[in-house]
Image (tube, helix red, strand yellow):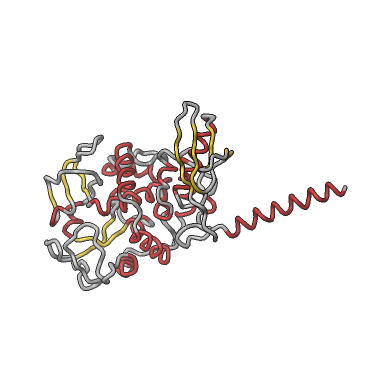
Amino acid sequence: MQQKEEKMRVIATLCLSALSLTLWAQGPNGSGNYYRAANGKKGATLKTALCGIIYNRTERTYNDLWTDFRTTDARPDGKVWDMYSNITNYTFGTDQDKGSGNKEGQYYNREHSFPNSWFGGKIMPMYSDLHHLYPTDKLVNNKRGNHPFGETRGETYKSANGFSKLGSCTYPGYSGIVFEPNDEYKGDFARTYFYMVTCYEEKLADWYRNYEDVKPTLDGKTYPGLSSWVLKMLMEWAEKDPVSQKEIDRNNAVYSIQANRNPFIDYPGLERFIWGDMTDVVFQYDHADMAYYTGIKALNNAVSQKTEIYGVGGQRRHRLSPGINIIRKPNGRSRKVVVKRKQAK
């Protein structure tokens, strides 16, 4: 009887410890437990779980955006942060689109980076969703029109200094006209598109069926959501242009206004869990460091290949530990895996 009571006390203690860890676990960038419902998910299931989290938000009017941009898209000097042109120096309000003008650097307007014609026009909540709306130079925006993002030589149009380009697609898989943003912001737009096909995954099939211009970009399915050539390209863009402080600050600013977040900014490399090489690794909302997941994946591979794991001092381990781990394969080859130590909350 005494042993049974002791066992029950141990179980109760473990349960309370687990509950405590759950209650105190925090996501990145001040997100707290916002993403907790996606914990333990992977691949397509993770995408759907994230959709259930980020779809709910405070809906804005289209006219609200002029004011919202002052919070979400101000440069350090207080001017408008334009991602389509590098010669603009706009003042909020003063240089706002007035329905006239035909020169680069004259006015800024509201750009749907995921064109609104792709989802039916003035349809809420997409039409005013700040996560894909940016203030951009009016002329360059008009040149872009509703063409998909892509890579091009820019034989049709180039903005000042060749910052943005329009022309035939040179990326394998598509040959139509595309708009290429500058390398500086390609990752920003990639993560914007990852957000769009995640947040609105239940609408993707309808958009594909009803709006011809979206077909080069979408595949007509909930998953993957993006066409194969676009997905491959955007994954490359996201890797080459990693999450910046600008994106983190903007994500937090949008959250303060709209009450939803872009998880692909909060978790750099998250796209790999949904579409890339990490679809077999479960997501944990209180871990945003890819080094942690890389260690988990290496451990999974080690177990499946019956390899041995050693610490730096040569001590054999059953699992990866914070610090340097040496994975020794049956063929005699070794691989070093570094796992960062989790910071105290």
User: Residue 71: x and y, percent?
Assistant: 34, 69
Q: Can residue 48 be seen in this view?
A: no
Q: In this view, does 331 lie above or below 152?
A: above
Q: Is residue 172 visible?
A: yes
Q: Is residue 109 left or right of residue 61?
A: left
Q: Which residue lies furthest to the bottom in this view?
A: 94
At x 21% / y 57%, what residue is drawn? 84
**Quadrant (top left, top right, bottom left, bottom right) of the C terminus:** bottom right
Q: In this view, does 5 lie to the left or right of 205?
A: right
At x 78% / y 53%, what residue is drawn? 9
User: Residue 108: x and y, percent?
Assistant: 21, 64
Quarter occupied by residue 171:
top left
Q: Residue furthest front?
A: 313
Closest to the observer: 43 or 57?
Answer: 43
Q: Is residue 329 above or below residue 128?
A: above
At x 34% / y 38%, what residue is drawn? 219
Closest to the observer: 146 or 162?
Answer: 162
